[in-house]
Amino acid sequence: MPECVSRRNLSGFLDKTQLLKIKLRAIRAGVWYRALRRIDRVLVDLTLRVAANVRSPSLARSIQSITEKLEDVLESRLARTIREIGYSLASKLSVLAQKWGHREAWRWAGDQGFARYLAVLRLNG
């Protein structure tokens, strides 16, 4: 996955290139106009035009909120299911298998492949 836009640069504030990347991803995915209100789009556009980086804490909070909203909309259905359901099921099965005496089952809880498998089963079932 590309660099997460919500990450902050070393100074602790949002970077213009990160903001531009998420805007372009949202436009390409067709969610820029659907997911954001007009005021949010204008705020991002003005920030990109005027500021090299965001230094104001209140502006940074507003931009951060907008980027989180876009990242949530841009996340695929499978990725969301893996995050919300796959890891939860993997940890439950891990605990159950450990109770049954399987000593290596503790690894299942954090296994991305196992979580993906369980998420796909959930989507198809």
Image (cartoon, helix red, strand yellow):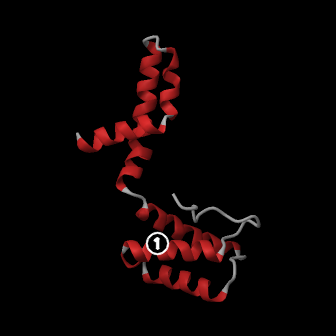
Q: In this view, does 26 lie to the left or right of 7?
A: left
State whether residue 1 is above or below residue 70.
above
Q: Nearer the viewer, residue 54 or 59?
A: 54
Q: Name the residue under label 1.
A: 25
Name the residue furthest top.
101
Against 115, is 75 above or below?
below
Residue 43, image x and y in percent? 55, 82
Name the residue type under label 1: Arg
87 to 96, vertically: above or below: below
Seen at 32% across and 42% down, the residue is: 120
* Residue at left offset 48%, top offset 81%: 41
Near mark 1 (Cα within 10 A), the count class, few <14, some 14-19 or many ≥20, is some
Q: Which residue is drawn at 60% across and 71% down?
A: 18
Residue closest to the eye, 75 or 37: 75
Decide if residue 73 is on the left or right side of residue 42: left
Q: Which residue lies furthest to the left in this view?
A: 125
Helix or strand or loop: what does disc 1 sit on?
helix
Task: In the displayed orientation, state which residue is furthest to the right.
Answer: 11
Q: Quadrant of the C terminus?
A: top left
Residue at 38%, 71% in the rendered image: 29
Horizontal relation, residue 94 to residue 64: left or right: left
Q: Where is residue 67 in the image (x, y as percent from the top left)?
A: 53, 68
Can I make out residue 67 in this image? yes
Residue 14 x/y as whole percent: 66, 71
